[in-house]
Amino acid sequence: MAQLLIELFSEEIPARMQQGAARDLERMASERLKAAGLTYEALTTFAGPRRLMLVVEGLPTATPDRGEELKGPRTSAPEQALEGFLRKTGLTKDQLSERDGVWFAVVSEKGRPTADLIAEMVDGIVRGFPWPKSMRWGSGTLRWIRPLKRIVALFDGAVVPFEIDGIASGDTTEGHRFLGSSQPFAVKDFADYRAKLEKQFVLLDVADRKLRILEGAQKACAAKGLALVDDDGLLDEVAGLAEWPTPILGDMDPQFLTLPPEVIRLSMKVHQKYFAVRDPATHGLAPHFVVVANVEATDGGKALAAGNSRVLSARLDDARFFWDEDLKTGFEVWSKKLEGVTFHAKLGTLAERVDRIAALAREIAPLVGADPDQAEQAARLAKADLSAGMVGEFPELQGVMGGYYARAFNHPEAVADAVRDHYKPQGPADSVPTAPLTVAVALADKLDTLVGFFAIDEKPTGSKDPFALRRAALGVIRLLLDNQIRMPLQDMAFVAGEYLSGIRRFQKLGNYAAAATVRETILSKEEVEADRVRIASQLTSDGSEWEVGAGDYQAGLTILGWDVLAFFADRLKVLLRDQGKRHDLVDAVFALGDDDLVRIVRRVEALDGFLATEDGANLLAGYKRASNILKAEEKKGPVPVGMVNTGLPNQPEAETTLAFATAAAATAVDAALETEDFAAAMRALSQLRAPVDAFFTGVMVNSDVAEERENRLKLLGQVRAVMGRVADFGQVAG
């Protein structure tokens, strides 16, 4: 078994692309080795500022000989079929064998030296590498992220000879651009390669570079009684900028500490790639920073620190200018500017959007325990900072700066917090606000976004979600579930649609595909489809104004609410699936028409626990059997309904027992659902398990006696109905 070492040495690779490139290199090499029939013990890739590297341990020196038997046409088949089979296999007729009237061919392939396959593999990888962006240089045809300079290709200690666009493979590489020797050096294998690189001031592994940065930065801070502000994203980035990272502590003018700390940190991070430093005694930022250099300076980094300090001061001077100018302006001017900013061509200006959010926040406030007046006030301030100079310079600070400005202009603390945090949560890892006022504004903001874009038929498709509607829906779900807020989503979507249509006329409110997924809780599917068609047909030619009656308008908003609710169901399934819950259980509960997410999740959890028991699994099987019988009868005509007769002549005991058990279960289930004790509802259903089993064991449903058959169908219908009060068990897999 031998070792393969490949290094692709180039000009600087952007830090954000390095780890993705390492994964792509691993995938492409693995696929090609397996396709060639080569096994290996381990495959590892590394990426750095100037090189992509691959090492494969335990490769055989040649591929194994391979033989394959191919089945051909029958011996009685036309001659043309046999000729085609011979062309495919490259054999002659006398090399075929005949068995049971069928031609067979044995195709053998001699093993090839691994070195030959490596040359082909590397050429294919380099020419087909999926860089997000690439460039072509000189007169060659090769495209790479930056000009490719060298290729190291060693197999079993020997160079694998090949050439790619004039670049010949070899055994030499280069060290650090400044600290290493000016001459390339030869390597023998991976251990030799890694050791020599480190002597030439190159850390190959990104984990080693991160560790060097952290340890050096923490040591420099500790020497002055300071602490490093952790930033994993920045650490990932700077680890891809330096082959020999050297942290240096620099000084910042203390006067800049009067700026909001988010402004200081963002200026450091975005523009300069500096780490912020804090004072453990005050828990605030300290007038220092850590810069990661790619050299070891002879003066200990003093000149580098001073130069970087001057650059940072210039950046922070700009930030202070924006801060001072914004404090001279204020919310009234910013809000006025929003009237001239289009949010979306079909959804109006940002000022109109603010009006919608403010009205919706007032509606939501009582549901979350917030003051309606303050909710409206906070919503009207929430988007104003989009016109502020600081947010224009640092868009990442939207909301955050609004919170600071709200405090500076003496708005209540709760209002300022709501302005600051109303965008949250912005992702699965983001924190969820708990303050009632913040929750009200955050929900209003996200619901307006969802309803607005659904109303103009701009829903996510496949992997595309240009308006981040999936993130908005997940944000609403997390806000409701984490805060245990009992809010009817469909009703609130309806209200949001009313505010939307009242402030800005938009195109085709009735043009939705949701009718197929609508639960028949308000209108039947036929009525929904009829309303949808009628609304669409009665719009003006440009689709911009309503010319329909109140009933059609209400129906259109109802359809919109259903459409949004179906989207929430889909997002909730994703969230619960990530938590280990079954997605089919979400469907089974949503089928009841409920739109209270807190209650839905409780139902799902109770249903999940019930189905995990033997009683639950067996009762589910009984439900499906009953449901299948009823569906078959429904195809023939109406299924009998009504009271079950328990006094028929010669009535089996199992039938009578199930009838009484079903009635008892119905009473118990209704009582449990009334108090939302879903575990008790499941326990009540579990009492049906034995009677249902006994019924199907000892009773023939399709009796020759019409009265018996009708009575038993009524009984199965009641069993299905009782279970259907808890969940639509027909949606449950298994």
Image (tube, rainbow, N blue to C red):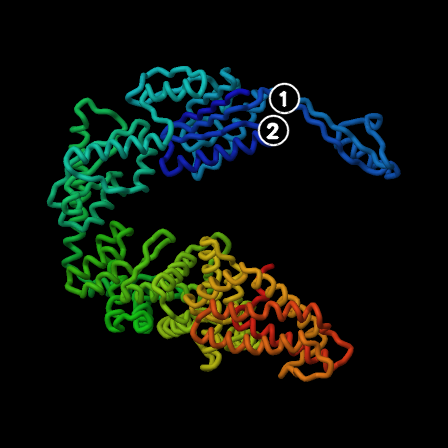
Tag 1: amino acid: Arg
36 relative to 669, above or below: above
Q: Which residue is located at x 19 percent, y 61 percent?
A: 406
Determine contact: label 1, label 2, CB under 8 Å: yes
The residue where tag 1 is placed is: 112
Point out residue 717 in the picture as x, y percentages from the top left corner: 63, 75
- Camera-side residue of 96 and 330: 96
For label 2, the SS is loop
Q: CA distance from mark 1 to mark 2?
A: 9 Å
All told, the count of numbered labels is 2
Tag 2: amino acid: Ala
Q: Is tag 1's residue or tag 2's residue first in the polypeptide sequence?
A: 2
315 relative to 11, above or below: below
For label 1, the SS is loop
Q: Which residue is located at x 52 percent, y 78 percent?
A: 667
Label number found at residue 36: 2
Q: Quadrant of the N terminus?
A: top right
